[in-house]
């Protein structure tokens, strides 16, 4: 083997080793964020705890609607209590809350095989990823101060 062939072979081997080492280092840096505990799914209890620690927004009074008279505890400076709840459907999970008697969707997470199709403030829809006609549509209402899920006609949830 002549000297030139030996140098070319050594150069290619060095470049291959360097490329592998750079790839391993990059995966190590990127992979640390992917396996961090912050990116793991949360349990219902963890979600409830986190939602309870978030202060609920105080709804502003619109000029077209008279604002409700505050209760004794609210008049003393307490903010209205928002009641949050995690609701399961066959299409996914919905976290909703009632603040001041008004329903609101906080988050929606599709189940495996479904995707989030539509999310409004009180209505949502999951659709099957394999069959776009398999839909789970619902509305969130406040019943007794707690969020409740009302399936739309044709859904069995």
Image (cartoon, rainbow, N blue to C red):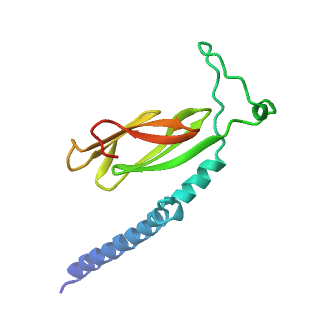
Name the residue rendered at 28%, 54% in the picture.
113
Residue 60 position, x and y percent, is 64, 24
Name the residue rendered at 51%, 64% in the picture.
36
Residue 122 position, x and y percent, is 46, 34
- Nearest the viewer among 115 and 77 is 77
The residue furthest bottom is 1
- Nearest the viewer among 109 and 44 is 44
Residue 29 position, x and y percent, is 47, 65
The residue furthest top is 64
Quadrant in which the N terminus is drawn = bottom left
- Residue 27 vertical placement versus 151 (above, below): below
- Nearest the viewer among 138 and 16 is 138
Quadrant in the picture for residue 30: bottom left
Residue 49 position, x and y percent, is 61, 55
Name the residue rendered at 44%, 41% in the picture.
149
- Nearest the viewer among 30 and 141 is 141
Name the residue rendered at 30%, 45% in the picture.
156
The residue furthest left is 1
Q: How many marks?
A: 0
The residue furthest front is 144
Residue 100 as seen in the image, left or right of residue 156: right
């Amino acid at each position: 083997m002549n000297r030139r062939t030996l140098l070319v072979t050594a150069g290619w081997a060095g470049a291959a080793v360097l490329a592998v080492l750079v790839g391993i280092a990059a995966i190590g840096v990127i992979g640390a964020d992917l396996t961090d505990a912050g990116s793991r799914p949360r349990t219902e209890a963890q979600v409830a705890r986190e939602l309870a620690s978030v202060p609920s927004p105080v709804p502003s009074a619109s000029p077209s609607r008279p604002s409700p008279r505050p209760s004794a505890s609210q008049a003393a400076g307490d903010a209205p209590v928002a009641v949050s709840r995690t609701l399961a459907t066959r299409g996914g999970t919905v976290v909703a809350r009632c603040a001041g008697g008004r329903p609101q969707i906080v988050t929606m997470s599709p189940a495996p095989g479904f995707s989030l199709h539509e999310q409004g403030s009180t209505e949502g829809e999951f659709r099957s990823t394999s069959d776009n006609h398999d839909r789970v549509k619902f509305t969130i209402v406040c019943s007794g101060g707690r969020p409740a899920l009302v399936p739309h006609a044709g859904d069995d949830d």
